Amino acid sequence: MLTCTAVIMDILLSLPSLLLLFVISISSLLLFFVLLSQIWSKDLSSYPPGLEPYPFIGHLPQFLKNRHRMVDWQTDSGRFRYAVHRFWVIKKLFGVGSERRLREAIATVHNTAMQIIRSKKKERRASSSSSSSSSSSSSVPQAEDLLSRFVVNEDHSEEFLRDIVINFMLAGKDTTSSALTWFFWLLSSRPEVEANILDELRSIRARNPTTGAAAFDFEELREMHYLQAAITESMRLYPPVPVSSLTCLSDDVLPDGTAVKRGWFMSYTSYAMGRMEAVWGADCEEYKPERWLEAETGAFRPESPFKYPVFHGGPRMCLGKEMAYIQMKSIAACVLENFAVDVAEKAGAPEKMISLTLRMKGGLPVLFRPRESRV
């Protein structure tokens, strides 16, 4: 009798602990299944196009087949849409789901940048050794590109150089390629614009006949006013970065009287601003490079960056604006001088893909035909 009473007392005394253990176990089990459903959800929209996983073997087939698209996948804004997920803290704590993919994507981009830096340093050391063993008066190789100019300064850490390279990759790669893609698509339907560009290139070549088939130099690129107007007009209609966001540093009032408070997160769309009749007039939907040219001289006439915010404005204006124009004008001029570019599918407007940049879904299939006579 005493033994039974002791057992019953032990059970009653341990009952709160058992209930607590039961509640913790059930909660942990429910949390596990919730996390599992999030990680293995059938909704694959959080994956960049072409990178949906296969059972068991994951992403291996896509990586083997599409190695050249690595940077596009790692920088696709689609994978950041779920960064503020309701379970993001738990995912980050355990390193699972989107947080694991984010960590792997960052590591891939960092490793790629470091490979570029180490390759450039190795190239510089080899050039330095070659110069020192020759009769050259200088043993230090000239910095012929932007990265070399930073590498030459040995005070910069590899992390600093890595961030510089990533800025080049993210700010210079997708934006420039997006702008040129839409430019060539618009040009395919406007032969008179292409003819004006070719006339300008002929005029520049005629003034410098000794250059022959060489690439255009910096001064010649600066003389391409109509080409710059044509590229600028295409970016008005199809800005590389269609939506931009800013954080308000202090209380302020916008020109229309709207009050904004410190810490507010604000966005504006360059895509919509470039198509507003109140800003650009009744022909705002028309591709018209002439709107950027002086009527008398034909010189390029820029607009206020707050009217044309493709490169932003104020203290945070894009530092690479001039470099981007040089790059785009150089590529467009060299291509158009040597080839006629025919768009393969001219029926209808291409489908847009909005991520960090305004891309064309599927790219722009074109046919290059050598010009019978160079401009």
Image (cartoon, rainbow, N blue to C red):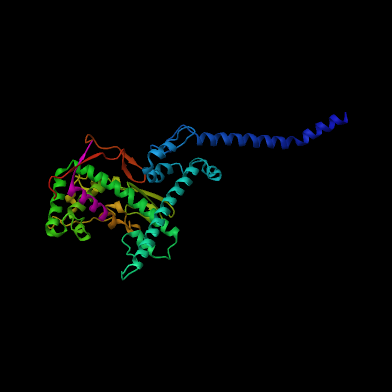
Question: Of helix, strand and loop, which mostly describes the magenta segment?
Answer: helix
Q: Quadrant of the N terminus?
A: top right
11 vs 44, nearest the viewer: 44
Residue plotted at (22% across, 60% down) = 218
Q: In x, y percent, where is residue 56?
A: 49, 33
- Give me the residue at 29% from left, 51% from top: 310
* Image quadrant in which you'd find residue 287: top left
Where is residue 246? Give x, y as percent: 39, 52
Does the stretch in magenta take in 160? no
Q: Nearer the viewer, residue 205 or 93?
A: 205
Q: Position of residue 374 (x, y in %)?
A: 14, 49
Left or right, residue 200 beside residue 100:
left
Q: Position of residue 174 (x, y in %)?
A: 33, 48
Is there any visible trace of residue 249 in the rendered image? no
* Relative to 343, 241 lies left or right: right
Q: Horizontally, is 297 left or right of 167 in the view?
A: left
Q: Which residues are magenta?
A: 326-344
Q: Does 334 lie within the magenta span?
A: yes
Quarter holding residue 66: top left
